[in-house]
Each structure stands twice: as structure tokens, then as C-alpha cells.
Amino acid sequence: MVLCIPAFVGCDSDDPVAKTCELSAGDRPTVEIDITFTATSTGDGEITQLTYIVAGEETVVSNPNLPWEIDVLIPAETDFSISANGSTTNGSITVAYSGTAISYEISGSDSCSHEND
């Protein structure tokens, strides 16, 4: 006599799910200004590719060590931006820029966060 016992295969609905993030922030200053580009994370947030663009010139940084920062001189009336691709399961990632020139201030950011209960 052969005994058959059905096998049940299931998925654990409590498996953490990662969130994919695409971030972008930029502007166009009216005066020449030193801009500080930054990228940060909390928890397990990671950035796989970071790009900053000044006057059409693109610089790509793969897998930057976070926190990451660079200062760049931006000419007046010149477009600039920072963007990043990354992910997080329990945490966040943020890209930002900020700068001050005499009485002119500029800043912006974009962030992505995700928490699994």
C-alpha cells in the first residue's frame, strides 16, 4: 500500500519587499553660485547610480558610498540637476542640492522611502 501525502508550497507574505526609486532635482540659478550636491540614505537604502548635470555636461557615479557630496560652481542662467536610481526595503534615499551667493539662496531635493512592517 502506497500512502500519498500532498506537499504544500507557499509563499511567506511577510517577506520584505524592496521599493525601486528614481529621484531627480534641479534648477537654474540667476547668479553664479557654488552648489553642493548630496546623496544620503537611512536604513538599507542604496543608490546604484547617481548623475549630476551642469550645462549639459553629465557626470555619472556608480554605487556611490553614502553619504556622498560634491561642490560644483554653476554659472548664472545655467541648468543643473542631480538624479539617482536606487532601492530600499526599510529605509530611504535622498538627493539634494543647496547653495548661497551673496543674498541669493537655492535648494531642492527628492527622496524615496519604504518600510516593511
Image (cartoon, grey):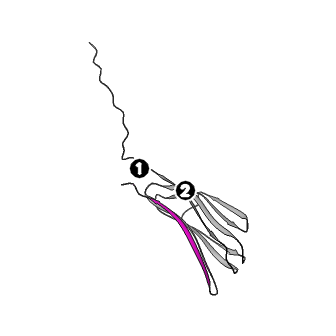
Q: CA distance from mark 1 to mark 2?
A: 16 Å
Helix, strand or loop at mark 1? loop
- Circle 1 sits on which residue? 16
Percent x, y for residue 102? 64, 87
Residue at x 69%, y 62% (from the top left corner): 59
Residue that appears at 38% across and 39% down: 11
Amino acid type, mark 2: Gly
* Pointer 1 with pointer 2, Cβ within 8 A: no
The image shows residue 3 at horizontal and vertical percentages of 27, 18
Asked whether 60 or 27 is in front, the reply is 27
Q: Amino acid at mark 1?
A: Pro
Q: For numbered disc 2, what is the local secondary structure? A: strand
Q: Earlier in the sequence, mark 1 or mark 2?
A: 1
The magenta segment is 99-117
Q: Is residue 44 above or below residue 77?
A: above
Answer yes or no: is residue 116 visible: yes
Asked where in the image residue 68 lies, by quadrant, the reply is bottom right
What is the quadrant of the C terminus in the image?
A: bottom left
- The answer to whether residue 36 is above or below residue 3 is below
Residue occupying image coordinates x 73% and y 68% = 55
Q: Note whether 40 is above or below 11 in the view shown.
A: below
User: What residue did someone put label 2 on?
Assistant: 86
Judging depth in this view, the residue of 56 and 66 nearest the camera is 56
Q: Is residue 43 left or right of residue 47?
A: left
Neighbor class of circle 2 (other Cα within 10 Å; few <14, some 14-19, many 20+) is many
- Which quarter of the rendering shows the N terminus? top left
